[in-house]
Image: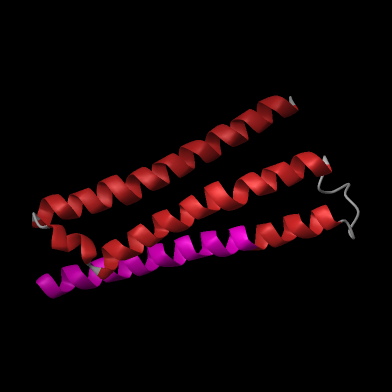
Amino acid sequence: MSTLLRTLEFLSLSLWLGSDVFLSFVVILLARLLRTRTLASLVTPAALCVVLMILLTVVSQHAVNPKMAALRVQMGSIQATAADSPLLAEFSRLHRISVTLESGVLLAGFAAMYLMVRELASMR
C-alpha cells in the first residue's frame, strides 16, 4: 500500500510540474509571441517573470530535490531521525532552500499576472 501511495504521489507531482512548465513556457510565451509577432515581446517584464519561474523550478528540481531524496534514503525516516543528526540538519537546510525557491516561483507568477493585466489595461 505504501508503494502505491508513493507512486501516486510521484505521479501527481510529475504531472503538476510538467503542466506548470508547459503552461508557463509554451502557452504564455508562445501565445505572446504569436499575438505580437515580434521577439522583442519576450523581453517584457511579464515574460521575464515567467522565465524566472522556469529557472527557479529547474534549480529546485535538479539541484535541491535530488539531494533531499538522497538524504531521505540515508535517514530512512525523517520522523525517526534524531533531532541532532547532521543528516536531518542538512535536510532541513535544503528544505528551507526548496521552500524559498518555490515561494519565488509563486511570487514571480503573481508579478507576471499583475504585469500582464497592467499591460493589457494600457493597450485599451
Name the quadrant of the N terminus.
top right
> Along the horizontal axis of the image, is 70 left or right of 117?
right
Task: Quarter of the image for the C terminus: give it.
Answer: bottom left
Taking the magenta stretch, the answer to whether it contains residue 77 is no
Q: Residue at x 84, y 57 (%)?
A: 86
Residue 40: which quarter of the image? bottom left
Residue 100 falls left or right of residue 85? left
Give above or below for 20 relative to 48. Answer: above
Q: Between 31 and 89, which is closer to the camera in this rendering? A: 89
Q: Position of residue 65 (x, y in %)?
A: 61, 48
Q: What stretch is highlighted in magenta?
A: 97-124
In-front residue for pair 8/78: 78
Image position of 8 with respect to 83: above or below: above
Q: Which residue is drawn at 66% across and 48% down?
A: 67
Location of residue 36 by image quarter: bottom left
User: Which image quadrant is residue 123 in?
Assistant: bottom left
| Spot occupied by residue 62 in the image (x, y as percentages of width and height) | 54, 47
Against 6, residue 56 (above or below) is below
